[in-house]
Amino acid sequence: MDAAALKVGDAIPELTINRVSRQTLALYAGASGDHNPIHIDTDFTRAAGVGDVFAHGMLVMAWLGRALTGFAPQSALRSWGVRFASITQVGARIRCTGTVTERFEQDGERRLRLDIAATDEHGDVKLKGEAVVAVG
Amino acid sequence: MPRLDRNLIGTVLEPVVAEVEKGEIRQFANAIGATDPIHTDLAAAQAAGYPNLVAPPTLVFCLAQRNAEPTKGLVKLGFDVAKLLHGEQHFEYFHPVCAGDTITLSTRIEDIYEKKGGLLEFMVQKTDAVNRDGTLCATMTAVVVQRHG
């Protein structure tokens, strides 16, 4: 898509992630170095009284990052941040979305500011934040 | 009852040094489902102007976890890890992080504050990721939340 043509109010292409599986969480634990058992060991979570394992917040953030680098090259990503609003359960189907809120110029380049969010299939917000992407 | 010492504000934590490898970039890209070949194929990365495979945007955060034990560091700072939440995470990028880089992560405690009458305590940590040439690649700001009760 032509990121430079995006206007305020336009959405970037939505990214839908396959249902969160335990295997996905195990792979992410190994790759990220975050071995917290709360994300991978159901025996631990049961003993701790939290029920089931749940996704690493930073895994969901990585998915949101894929939505950003999907509409513009990674080299155009200037800054972004999120607040972790709620935990993401095994089985959740995460949607990553972004909407342009501002077009502005800074450091000699045109930039877009976007509201970004990751939500599950029930509309529950998991992550919410903002990103700034250069468009030339 | 606050448990985080406000005198920690301004403290600089022990730096973490991470050697970024092709294998870990490929493994991380696979784990997050990133299909852009700049993370997995050297020719594609070089065609896009990178010297080597480029790390996906959040991998620079994970370099600390992969090369040190930041959770143990949080315990030393006074956190009860059983009631710890990652509240916010922010990134600002200045230069790519690629395979072959040696990245030094230096973290400073920027602020400690409380909300809800002390039921929640917040620590703001700012980390600079600097490569071997002394170039600042990224800054990261994490808000770590301690729940009480």
Image (tube, rainbow, N blue to C red):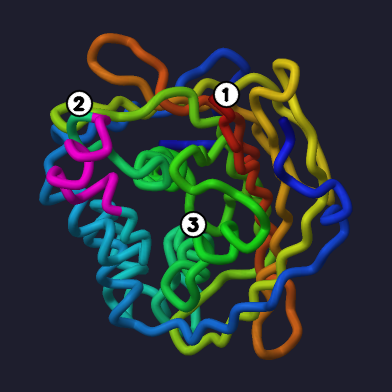
Residue type (three-letter) at the residue carrying disc 3: Pro
Identify whether A22 is placed above or below B117. below
Q: What residue sits right under mark 2 in the picture?
A: A92
**Residue span colored magenta:** A37-50
Q: How many dots with numbers?
A: 3
Q: Cβ–Cβ below 8 Å for labels 1 and 2? A: no
Q: Which of marks 1 and 2 is in front?
A: 2
Residue A115 numbered mark, or none: 1
- Is disc 1 surrounded by few (<14), some (14 to 19) or many (20+) residues within 10 Å? some
Of pointers 1 and 2, the one earlier in the residue sequence: 2
Instruction: Using the image, name the chain to which the residue with label 2 belongs.
Output: A
Q: What residue sits right under mark 3 in the picture?
A: B57
Same chain, labels 1 and 2 = yes
Identify whether B83 is placed above or below B74. above
Instruction: Using the image, name the chain to which the residue with label 1 belongs.
Output: A
Q: Cβ–Cβ below 8 Å for labels 3 and 1? A: no
Identify whether B115 is placed above or below A130. above
Look at 54% across and 46% down and name the residue there: B80
